[in-house]
Amino acid sequence: MAGAERPAPRCCVRRATSRSRSGSDSDVATVEELLRAGVELLRAAGSETPRLDAELLLARAVGVDRTVVLAHPEAPVTAGSEASFAAELERRADGEPVAYIRGFKEFFGLALASDPRALIPRPETERLVELAEREVVARLSAAARPVGTAPLRIADVGSGSGTVAIALAVLLRRRKMLSEVEILGTDISREALNLAQENAVGHGVADRVRFMEADLLPPVIATPFAIVLANLPYVRTDALPRLPIAASFEPAIALDGGPQGLSLIHGLMGRLPDALEEGGVALLEIGADQADAIEALAHETLPGWRTEVALDLAGQPRVARLEPPRRAGS
């Protein structure tokens, strides 16, 4: 949203709405009037989703769900709510992400706390969680698991706000399988892990999901993992300045994937032979233009491993699945 010309009445939504009341003498703005003014302001500021942004921020200011705002365009809005809406429109017009303004982001139906300590969850990452759930369910359902069987160990590398680990844990809880797994989320940022812990507690999965400050994986892995998940930074360094301005509010360390966007993924690949148990698998989120590069990197770093790339709902390459060869006699 940088460089866009801002409308003159940016500091006051009421001034903008007053122009659209068709001569009404009412001194109380309606939902429809405020939305119209908010959309106009955010569109001029360069928002890619001005209508959605305005709806979410007005719903927050009024204290209701977005669906209520949409269902009652004629409803009056108090002066206090209007002032709150105007202030948050200012922040959004300056480029601040809506998720940081609201303090949370919806992901897989969960409201995850979101602030500048960690990357904002992206909808594309839901594909990684879906595939992870599939892997876990297949393993837990393959054969009877006697009482006392060790839990299935899962690593979530680059956990950030805990998005993948927590969403997966909640899905497994719904299947009554959460007690059979143990999830470890790692991140190099202690601040991000503090946010992840808050999210785990908030969603009632802190007993099965724990977090550790580590550079990719723990330096010593006494018991290998059945599944390694990772949503590591994969944006090329030279592409960072071209990201939407909202990304400038997020931690650069959570976005910068190095010269080719694959530096951290390459580092993780080098750890996988020792990190995965026999029959284990790794699922790595990648950029839509990185499928060929990932396959080439895996061929070089992990000879003999099977590599597949799954598409997301938009038909774009999104998740690389890496599986080691079976050992002789297994």
Image (cartoon, grey):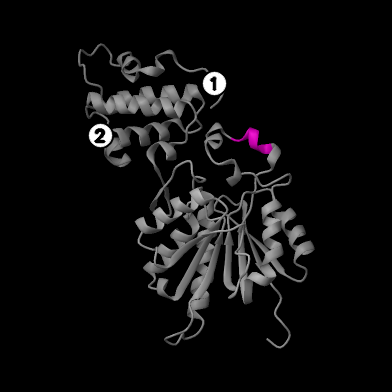
Total numbered labels placed on residues in the image: 2
Helix, strand or loop at label 1? It is loop
* Quadrant of the image containing the C terminus: bottom right
Helix, strand or loop at label 2? It is loop
Dominant secondary structure of the residues highlighted in magenta in the image: helix
Question: Residue 259: percent from the left, percent from the top?
Answer: 73, 44
Identify whether 233 is placed above or below 116.
below
> Range of the magenta residues?
239-243
Q: Is residue 153 left or right of residue 54?
A: right
Question: Residue 272: percent from the left, percent from the top?
Answer: 67, 67
For the residue pair 301 and 274, the one nearer the viewer reads as 274
Q: Would you name the residue on which mark 1 appears?
A: 4
**Cα–Cα span, label 2 and label 1:** 31 Å
Q: Is residue 323 left or right of residue 137?
A: right
Q: Would you name the residue on which mark 2 appears?
A: 72
Does residue 116 show up magenta in the picture?
no
Q: Amino acid at mark 2?
A: His
- Residue appearing at x 48%, y 73% in the figure: 137
- Residue appearing at x 32%, y 25% in the figure: 34
Does residue 242 show up magenta in the picture?
yes
Residue 240, label in figure:
none
